Amino acid sequence: APPPRLPARYLYGCGALFVAYTLAFFLALGWSASRVQVLEVGLLNYLWPVLTLVLSVPLLGYRARPALWPGAALALLGVALVTLQGSGLSLDAWLASSRSPLAAALGLAGAVTWALYSNLVRRWGPGAGPGAVPWFLLAAGVAFLAIAMAGAAPPAVTMAALAECAALALVTGLGYLFWERAMRAGDHTLVAAASYLMPLLSTLVSCLYLRVAPAGVLWLGSALLVAGSLVSWASVREVGAPEDRSLGPAGSRVADRAG
């Protein structure tokens, strides 16, 4: 059973967000129409660092400098350069030319959901005590199993596919465990600074794994996303913190949990 005395809103609210994010992100990858769109969906998903900062203002009560909004706009521009290429700024043209609008929409939904989770786990979670990430992962696995069983035909399973799934499960599970612990009780400034390198590192690893030669606009979009996230990160501060102390996505350990 989950650890005793976990706050109900953490267990059920954050648990629901965790499962929703996992479903949205991995289904977006699975429904991408090409390997290139997998890279685009990945970049959309990495809007979550800057969205976490933006949402920390209303959800955790942090103070934002005016530079937060240009930083967020810069990150959005980076993603727009990649996902709207060839369709200008017309949503209708993008929907007409997109290889899979549903995959893109799910990638964006995943970014919003993970930003909500990263803030609320700080507000509702049990501090430095044991969390419920293993149970969140189990719930997500049950949801994926239900989706697979509802399919018309089971997918072909090979030893290579099983090995890849096992490696992905191990890396993903550890990543989620470490991230939640950092959000609840860790050095958030250090974690935040490292998280903004994820879009570039993820794009590089994905390109190598998928054997895709990315266009220059993908690298430009990734760089703008990182730059915008860094500007936003430097613009959010905990209420009552020293003026020269900037905070990452979930802030420092204070009375976020009030309310």
Image (tube, rainbow, N blue to C red):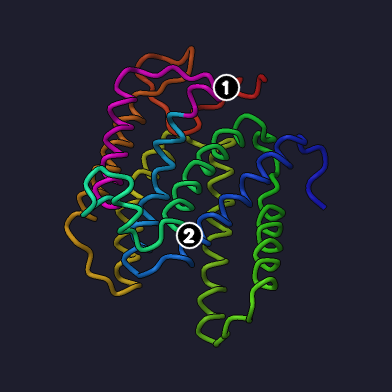
Label 1: which residue?
Answer: 254
At label 1, the amino acid type is Val
Determine contact: label 1, label 2, CB under 8 Å. Answer: no
At label 2, the amino acid type is Ala
The stretch in magenta equals 55-83
Q: Secondary structure at mark 2?
A: helix
Looking at the picture, does residue 184 appear above or below residue 219?
Answer: above
Which of the 4 image quarters holds residue 214? bottom left
Looking at the picture, does residue 131 appear above or below residue 42?
Answer: above
Residue 181: horizontal and vertical position, in percent? 58, 43
Q: Nearer the viewer, mark 1 or mark 2?
A: 2
Q: Secondary structure at mark 1?
A: loop
> What label does residue 46 carry, if any?
none
> What label does residue 28 carry, if any?
2
Residue 112: horizontal and vertical position, in percent? 49, 41
Instruction: Decide if residue 152 is on the left or right side of residue 24.
Output: right
Instruction: Decide if residue 85 is on the left or right side of residue 194.
Output: left
Q: Residue at x 57, y 85 (%)?
A: 156
Which of the 4 image quarters holds residue 195? top left
Magenta stretch encompasses residue 196: no
Instruction: Decide if residue 113 is on the left or right side of residue 35.
Output: right
Q: Where is the C terminus found, in terms of image quarters?
A: top right
- Mark-to-mark CA distance, 1 and 2: 36 Å
Few, some or many C-alpha atoms within 10 Å of disc 1 (few <14, some 14-19, many ≥20)? some
Instruction: Decide if residue 195 is on the left or right side of residue 187.
Output: left
Q: Residue at x 29, y 42 (%)?
A: 226
Count of numbered tags: 2
Foreground of the two, 74 or 189: 74
Q: Residue at x 48, y 22 (%)?
A: 57
Ranked by sequence position, the earlier of labels 1 and 2 is 2
